[in-house]
Image (tube, helix red, strand yellow):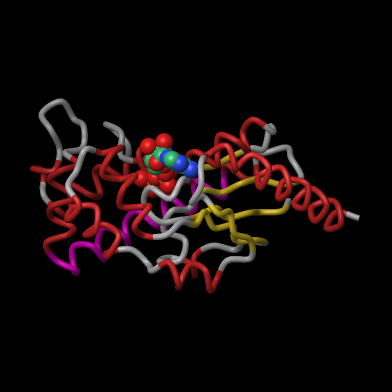
Amino acid sequence: MLKVGLTGGIGSGKSTVCRLFADLSVPIIDTDVIARQLVEPGQPALSRLAAAFGAAIVNPDGSLDRARLRQLAFSDPLHKRQLDAIMHPLIFKEMEAQITRLRAIYCLLVIPLLVETQNNYTLDRMLLVDCPEQVQIQRVMSRDKVGREQAMAVIAAQATRQQRLALAHDVIDNTAAPERLAEQVKRLHNSYLLLATAGTT
Ligand code: ATP
């Protein structure tokens, strides 16, 4: 199966693009969704996080206190590395398990931090949803109701636009109105179908 990794910075439009691929019945596995499922109450990943960061990261109802964990992870690079060391292999393993269950010739793997964690993944193509940082900032501010500084801080903690562009095989330009996306998605879909078919013959 052809594996296409979809990535892009915060607010670049990954979810928006995914909906268009989903409309074309492309199977989509999203590592953010997996990460959230892995830390649901009672899941082993949550116990491992509690063992590493203390029981205080678990709310009285057994759910993860995300704000507390985020605060811990961003206050100390060692904590961030510990968190990544626990979560990344589990996310990767679950993604691989889900891939084996798919019946399709190609699939889309949404990996927001693909450039930051690229060594873990074996992908056939890397698809980037791209727009200028100023556009990202505006969209994050209006979607998440946060200030410019906060939006800029998240962007600064991620890989740069140049780093992503340097690694991408395919780029979707999401600078203009969303109506401009469907045509780009259809064109890429056709080329992935062709590539996937060529790979199976
Ligand atoms: P995250 O990294 O936070 O998960 P994302 O990359 O999935 O974000 P989206 O949620 O798809 O990004 O888009 C970010 C915001 O920008 C959303 O509110 C979305 O509706 C809006 N948006 C996406 N594409 C466009 C566009 N072409 N024009 C205007 N607004 C857009």
Residue 5 image position (x, y, % from top left): 57, 55
In the rendered structure, the answer to whether residue 124 lies left or right of residue 17 reads right
Q: Quadrant of the C terminus?
A: bottom right
- Name the residue located 14 percent from the left edge and 53 percent from the top edge: 53
Q: Which residues are magenta?
A: 76-97
Q: Residue furthest top?
A: 61
The quadrant where ligand 1 appears is top left
Residue situated in front as seen by the camera: 84 or 182: 182
Note whether residue 29 is visible. yes
Residue 181 image position (x, y, % from top left): 59, 43
Q: Is residue 146 above or below residue 73?
A: above
Q: Is residue 97 above or below residue 130?
A: above
Residue situated in front as seen by the camera: 130 or 164: 130
In the rendered structure, the answer to whether residue 51 lies left or right of residue 155 reads left
- Name the residue located 34 percent from the left edge and 57 percent from the top edge: 134
Membership of 162 in magenta stretch: no
Q: Give the number of marks.
A: 0
Note whether residue 33 is visible. no
Residue 7 image position (x, y, % from top left): 49, 55
Q: Quadrant of residue 19?
A: top right
